[in-house]
Every structure is written in C-alpha cells, then in structure tokens.
Image: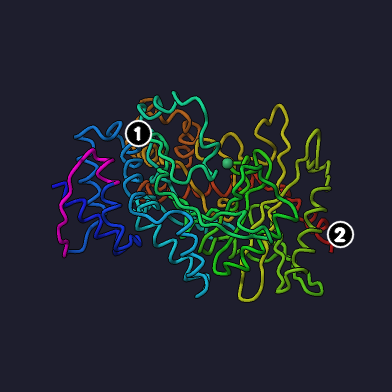
Amino acid sequence: MINTRINELISYAQKNLYLGIDDDYYAVNRILYLLKLNKFTKEEITEEVDFFETMEAILDYAVENNDIESDTVIARDAFEGKIVDCLLPRPSELTRMFKQKYKTGPLTATNFFHDLSVKTNYIKTIRIAKNIKYKYEGKYAPLEITINLSKPEKDPKDILAQSKILDKYPTCPLCMENEGVYQATSLAPRSNHRVISLTLNHEKDVWGMQYSPYAYFPEHTIVLRKDHSPMYVNERSFAELVDFINKFPHYLIGSNAGLPIVGGSILGHHHFQGGKYDFPIEKAEVLRKYKKRKVTIEVLNWPMSVIRVSSNNENALLDQVGDIFKAWQNYNNDKLNIFKETDHPHNTITPILKLNGAQYEFYMVLRNNYSTEDKPYGWYHPREEYFHIKKENIGLIEVMGLAILPGRLVKELELIEDCLVNNTNPIKYPELEKHLPWIETLKEENIDLENIQDTLKQRVGEIFEKVLEDCNVFKHGSIEDLYRFVEKII
Ligand SMILES: [Zn+2]
C-alpha cells in the first residue's frame, strides 16, 4: 500500500540520506502533498528497504492517480527527484556537512557527497551500468570505447511539452538555477540536484561542485562558476585547475577548450570536469623529454599533439604552462594550415591536470578551430566520412582516450552484422544509410565473419583513433614541427 511505501522511504532516508529524526513528519507531509494524500499512519519498517522497488511502486501509484504529467521515463524521473527532494538536506546544510567531512580529509568529503548522490539516485547507476564498454588496442595505447545507453531518449511527448516553454529557465544546464528546479521535461531531473559551494583560486564560495548524473567514468565531477559566464582557457583557469587539485588531490581535473568546434557543448558557462579515474592518455609513451630546472616537458606519442609538463613546484609548473600556452596562441604555420587567428583567435588548448605522487602532471592538448567554406567543421575535426560513428566535438574526455559514442550504434551494428553475415541488402534498413560506404569497405575487405561482433567493435575503435588523429594539429609527418615549437620555448 502507498502508506507502507512512504514509511519505507522515510526509513531509507533516515539511514541513507541524513533525514533527521525530528524531520520525519515534515518530510512525510511534503510527500503527501505531491501524492495528493491527506493521511498517513506510521508503520515500523524492520527490513532493509530497496530504494528502487519502493520508488517504482510510488511512481506507479502517482501515474495511476494522475500526479505525474505523463508516464514517460523523463516525467517519472522528474517526479522521483521531487519526492527525493522532500527527504534531503537543503543545499546550504549539505555544504556545511561537506565542509565538516573535509576536516577529516578531501577523500572523506567526496566519498560522502558521491555516496549521497548515488543513494538519492541522482547518479543513475543502474542506467550507467547498461553502457557498453570495451577496449581497442590501438597504435598509441589501449583506447576505451563507451556506447552510451544510459541517457533516456526523449519521448515526442516530452519534446512537445518542452517546445511550449518560452522563457528559458534555467539559463543553461550548469546554472545554479537548476538546484531544486522541477521540470517534467528535463533530461536530468533537478529537484534532487545539489551543488556544494567551493572556494577556488581565492574566490570564496564563487564555485560549485556537483556530480554528473550520467557519469562517463567513476565520480565524474563538474566544477562550475556559480555565475553564468563564458568558458575561458588561460593562465587564470590553469591556476584554478591547480587549486582544485590542491584541494582534491585524489581527483583528475580538466577543461574543455574555450572555442567553438574544439570545445565542449556548453561554452556559455565556465566549468571543469574531473573524477577519479586513470585515463588512457596517462599510458602514452614519451617521444621526447626536456628537463628544465624545476619542470619536465614531454611530447607524448598520442593521436593528438600533447605536451605534458610535470613539476612538484606549483609556481614553476604554472609559469611553464603559461609560457607554452602563450607561444601556442601566437603560433602560425602556413605549411600546416595552422593559423592563430583570422577575424577571431583559433589556437587554444584542452588542459588536464592530475597528481602523480607529489608531482603535478599538466597535459596540454594543442587545439585549433580554423574552418573554411569547404571544411565548415574545421580543419581539426573528425572528417565527414567518419560522421556515421562520431560527428560531435572532440572534447576533454575523448582527448584523454575515452570515446563516448551514441546509443544508436548498438542497433546499427547488429543490422550491419546481418548485412555482412546473411548478405542482406543494407538498403533495407533506413538507419544504415549513413554507414553504406563503410559497409562496402567491410565487404571488400572480406572481414572475419566468425567473430563479427568483435571485429565490428574493433573497427569502431579504429575509427575513433582516426577521428582523434583528424583533430591533431601537427598531423602525421609533422612531428618535427611540434618538437621545434616546444624547443623554441624552453
Ligand atoms: Zn549557466
């Protein structure tokens, strides 16, 4: 019965979500309002509560009683978030708790916040587990491929409802306005969304930290400025990254490049992404190594041009990184089609920072977004013949060797398998239209049909590697130019 389910939820929240013992009726009454109920009887819950089972039952009840706009995954998610919000500490209380935990240590603090974000089902662990993950043993290091099956597809009903929203609020998905907002059409429910307030680079409580609901790697964190102001990549952001690592030395942190095409999908709101994970780029071999007084500079063997600057001295690191960045901003090479600017700047970097013992390791991935009429996506973007696998910007996560590929590929690879094994004409499947040239190539090559699924996965990995190579500013054959660039600075 619904009364028992509410009791279960309260029991769960007291054990897992820091619901205070005196807050139970307060929380219950807020839930009753959402479910349009006017009565509640306390029951003793002795068994361990399965959050998902209890929540599903409550959501089914809400659908039956028309408390939810529609019975879509997204609308149910939004309502679930709203119910969980009734049980959670307010944002400022949570920040206070986080800061208290931080006194024990940064790991204790992030464990606390991450664990809570999982237990509220804000981080969609069950859906994330559906993602298909595998390795591709490429030329540089084993690359990691993820086919993303965790994000729910928008139902046409959700899209229609969203199209009726005139005023954009929140301004963007990273704005603080998202904290607690109820929107039945939002891809990620926000009512149970919490942001921890942070001080970075001497800006007190100007920053926020949250987890990604559809994490691409463990403890996928987003660090954002609280105000909606554009992305920047420069000496200031490098100092911000270093300060974050000083405060959370067990995490990696990086930023997307701040320019269109080579940047991430949200350029309007300054933010970083990080987490607790070892990325393939860390396994890259060193092609050349230069030693300066307190820093080591290495050119890595990677599909993109990467300079790694290491030091255990924060200032020496930031000075060296700043010098390389300035030199790159002013770098031109007509022969290689690298133009620092036309009517706007083109050279930037994707910066990533991690600690290796006591040593900061700053990865500077050189980027350029120069585009022409015949190359509207830019000279350093995946070429069009690979768009059937990856068309989107190559951002921070991909640069590090982890591909995030669209969920549609699962079905499409199955259909391609059918075409290759059973000689089915791919024209039969409209969704294969974009893959037709690739299917032709695979047929001509007489690929191994015995292990067709693995073969196709590996071929997808190979395309991802080529896509990264396409984004390389110093393409194959021009590595000497990269060495010359580095040697001139140091
Ligand atoms: Zn914003």
Q: Which mark is residue 488?
A: 2
Q: Main secondary structure of the magenta part?
A: loop
Q: Is residue 394 magenta?
A: no
- Image quadrant in which the C terminus is located: bottom right
Judge from the rendering whether residue 457 lies leftward or rightward of residue 346; answer left or right.
left
Q: CA distance from mark 2 to mark 1?
A: 57 Å
- Tag 2: residue type? Lys
Judge from the rendering whether residue 131 lies leftward or rightward of residue 2; answer left or right.
right
Image location (x, y in percent) of residue 190: 42, 44
**Residue mark closest to the camera, 2 vs 1:** 2
Instruction: Give ligand 1's quarter of the image.
Output: top right
Judging depth in this view, the residue of 381 and 420 nearest the camera is: 381
Image location (x, y in percent) of residue 393: 59, 41
Magenta range: 30-46
Q: Is any part of residue 364 visible from this angle?
A: yes
x 80%, y 42%: residue: 340
